[in-house]
Amino acid sequence: MAEAIAFDIAAELIIKLSSRALSQLGLWWNLKHDLDDLKSTVSTIKAVLLDAEERSVTSHLVKDWLEKLKDVLYDADDLLDDFSTEALRKDLMGGNKLTKEVRLFFSSSNQFAYGLQMGRKMKAIKARLASIEREANTFGFIPRDRPAETSFMTKRRQQTHSFELEDDIIGRDGNKTALLKLVLEFQSEENVYVIPIVGFGGLGKTALAQLVYNHEMVKNHFDLTMFACVSDDFDVKVIVANIIKSVTHQAPDQNLEMDQLQKQLRDKIDGKKYLLVLDDIWNEDPERWSRLKKLWMGGAKGSRIIVTTRSLGVAEITNKCQSHVLKLKGLSDDDAWSLFKKIAVEQGYADSTNSAFVEVGRQISERCGGVPLAIRTIAGTLSLKKTANEWHSFKENELAKISQIEGELLPILKLSYDHLPSHLKHCFAYCRLYPKDYRIEVQALVQFWIAQGFIKQLNQSQSLEEIGFGYFKDLVERSFFQEVEGDLMEEMRCKMHDLMHDVAESVAGMESSIADSNKIASDVGEKCRHISIKPSLIPLFKGKKLRTLLHFPNDIDQDLSEETWDFVIANCRCLRVLDLHSLGIQMISPSIYKLKHLRYLDLSSNYNIKILPKSICKIQNLLALKLDCCYGLKELPKKIEKLVNLTHLACEDYCSLTHMPRGIGKLTSLETLSMFVVDTDGSHGGADLSELRLLNNLRGELRITNLGFVKNAKEKFMAANLKEKQHLRSLDLAWGCSNGDDEKALEDLQPHPNLKELYINEWRGDAKFPSWLPFLTNLVKIFIRGGNFKYFPSFAQLSCLELLQIGFCTKLEYMDDNSPKGSQGEPQSFFPSLKCLSLFNCPNMKSWWRTTKPIDDDSNEGDTTVMGTSTMAFPCLSSLEIANCPLTLMPLYPSLYEDLMLSNTSSRPLKQTKMNINAKAPSTSTSSLPLSKLKSFDVHNIEGLDSHTLDECLQHLTSLKRLTIRDCKEIDLGFMQWEPLKNLSHLEIDNIPKLVSLPIWLQHLVQLKTLKILHWNGLRSLLPVFQHLTFLEEFEVTHCEELELSGAGIQIFQDHTSLRSLWLQNIPKCRHLPEWLQHLTNLQVLYLVNLPNLTSLPDEMRCLTSLEILSIRQIPQLEERCRKDIGADWHKIAHIPNIRL
């Protein structure tokens, strides 16, 4: 990677050397001439770097030259950073004008010494560069301007063709079916429809396209079929010539002009229904694609173009419909082994009946990550080896070095890397620091890149983090990352495929290392700039030029010793990134200020840190300070305003901060300030809310606590200037105990309309909600917890609102101050996006709307209208929770498809929803019964719910998978019809007094996997129903005081071989575990809790060979008998790995 990095560093150095500030510093230090010479030399070398990069591919001498150049350029960059840091420090000490500061520190003797020291270092770097420049002259490099990015690395892959044997394709049946359907059956509006296949190199995109291309049905379906390999050179003329050659089997005349080639192509395809495969497209320029697309639009209706690409960007350009983009994944372990076996065993010397070959072969094939190309390459190598020992030796000794194998694997995977722009090469290679299979936090990765200077801010309207996230998305589109989870960058996680990690390791070279053993830590060279290392190994590291020091915690708690602190500070002075999270640190070394190049410092999850040293404020280059989960942290440094470059101050998850330091409002570059703590009594001299006024670059989340203690609340709330913070995504306003300073002050905390999430906690002021809510038209989530609100303004018109949660509003009477008719509007505008609604602990809330007549449950239950409006329904609600709210009138919810949880509330809205098939919800119709898509239903102590109503309701729930019924005293489950619940897999029945036996209908629930029976005081036996529930995997019986589990003739579990977990709790009549226990041969977990009359375990326990966990609690006499080695029953359970007493 030296070649790409060297160019980037050289370019950055030239920018720094051209700055006016550095030129002025050079004058005062008498280094102006040296700085000009350095700029001239770097510019001369940079001019020949492109030629050197190309030649380094084949010349080790040139590659070594580039490594030496990169090393001295890094040193030069450190030196210039030293200059600018010193100037910034002095600038902060005495004023804002650089010229004044230079004069101030030049006049002192120590600054004169500093200038001499820097002069010596500058001359040493100039001498090294001069030597490197002389060596460059011996190579005869040719100065070149940079053309299109990385065009020098266009080592073409072997030309593909349209032929692929179907027998060679394994594990792609589903992809083949999907592609054939799109090619042959899909009816598109366009005559010519493009179908992209996307995935990283080696997954078999081309093979899949070839397979479908050669399918007999495809050949018969189209008038014309064509196949052209495009690869990296998206030259329209060349592509057209290749397509013509595919049709005529003869290359067109090379002297033909583009117009003539276009005519030939149109003559061949116009009016015909054709299939064209364009293999391996890299171009992401929509205009170039559009020019090519115009040439083939004359095809007949039904024509298809299959495009294979490694880039999601290409896929999106060629087809806007994501559901018609085929995204290939790796093969399953079984398919990978089938392919491996086909090549390494059936075509080689290995014996497929030899278990030694099979065992090691499977391990090797799994190492290939499901990538057919990798599998084929390694299997082909092993097919020449005759013994299982040779295979084993390969796995143990050579598989770790697979990236060094000559041939296809690494060069083809590396081809994707070679096509990256230089700035992305730098970013990707940096990921070598992560362990394989590590789940990478995307925001942290982007902040690492920023700290290292990899991110180029060409557009001032975008933050560095936004630009860096764009870099990440570029790499995702090119398949360098996979398994990306999360929608927001701060929540996003991803992984690198092991083979891609090998590529990163290869291109990073000596610059990066993972040191997880004494030997590796000792062997890491002086030139290593980035390392991830076990903290205990840090003192073994010899290098002194580190820019990154990371660690990735394992399951064992690690502590950072004082000696290690001293070592880092003494030997790692060039650090930009220092990650010390989760190391049990109690105190930060006061000498940390000596790490003056530091940009990123992570101290999070060190629970015992109480204060930070004052000296930390001398690290003026610091961009990110992470203090999340530092629960003991009581205060931030008083001079935090000196950290003038700080952009991220993270202190989430409720640290013990008592206040914010004064001057924090001067950090106008802040983009992350996760918490602002109001000083409750003013005793700490903390910052007040007015310090938020100028922090208008804040992004992400902001939580403001102790708002109830603010004096002159109206004035201070307005001074916080929240309405100007346009980049904030989430705002959490928490009052704590209110002093009643101004009960209307919430009105003055108006946020910006861009806000997505709003939290209001414990507001004790005015009962009226602030008037600014309707202006927050972009709100996606609202959380209101506690407060004196009696009603809310209408949330119904917030078109983006997806989640609404309201709890502990003890004075709340209704949700909407409008009359029901006034809030109704059109169905399309009534909560058009709401998916999740949660209402809990609002004991006075009886109606959704303000009504003009009292509501009681004695009125006609079939009357589903109040003032003619209660047929209003949520159009796309998927999850609803109502707990401890006597709500009898609310909008209906027939379209629910995820969860319905009703606890201590009225049954009336449920009855209305069930009965009102014509509820005004756009997504419902008479052909779709209310609640027919619901997956989970939890009903607990519902007023007015009887057996008939519940039975009728359950008839609709044909998609239900989970059902919980608790504390419903009027319900008799024995006489209900449960046939529609054919998909039920989880059933929990708790405290239903009328049940004295298992309902007969249980045996018809053939999908049931989990059954929990709790508080059935009348239940005497599980027979005869339970013996039919042989499909159960989890069974729990709790608080069944009359239940007999054993006795003469009782054989319950003999056929329950699927049972994995059994929980028996508080069953007084359980005197011993019966002999039928021995039949549970697949039981893995057994819980025995509070069985007062169980005095011993049966000998049959030894038959439970699959048992992994045995937990015995609140049974003192049995716990004594199960003591390790000495208990009377120990020999019966000694085989169980995990015994909990």
Image (cartoon, rainbow, N blue to C red):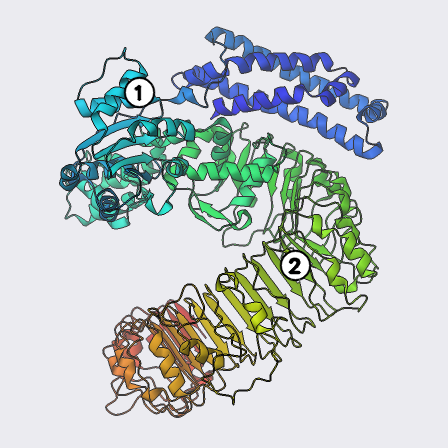
Residue at left offset 71%, top offset 71% = 767
Mark 1, secondary structure of its residue: helix
Badge 1 density bin: few <14, some 14–19, many ≥20, Cα 10 Å: some
Identify the residue position indicated by label 2 in the image. 732
Image side of residue 1099 versus residue 543, left or right: left
Tell me whether the residue at label 1 lies in contact with that at label 2, contact meaning CB atoms closer than 8 angstroms: no
Image side of residue 256 versus residue 31, left or right: left
Res. 717 image quadrant: bottom right
Q: Is residue 275 visible?
A: yes
Using the image, tell me which numbered label, if any, was put on residue 630.
Answer: none
Could you give the CA–CA distance between mark 1 and mark 2, rounded to whole angstroms? 58 Å
Identify the residue position indicated by label 1 in the image. 238
Residue at left offset 53%, top offset 30% = 528
Residue at left offset 43%, top offset 90% = 970
Residue type, mark 2 in image: Asp
Mark 2, secondary structure of its residue: strand
Image side of residue 684 versus residue 952, left or right: right
Vertical arrangement, residue 926 with respect to residue 231, above or below: below
Question: 538 and 26: which one is in front?
Answer: 26
Who comes first in sequence, dot 1 or dot 2? Answer: 1
Res. 815 image quadrant: bottom right
Locate residue 1028, reporting x and y percent: 24, 80
Badge 2 density bin: few <14, some 14–19, many ≥20, Cα 10 Å: some
Locate residue 87, reporting x and y percent: 76, 28
Locate residue 679, reporting x and y percent: 78, 59
Locate residue 841, reporting x and y percent: 59, 76
Vertical arrangement, residue 64 with respect to residue 748, above or below: above
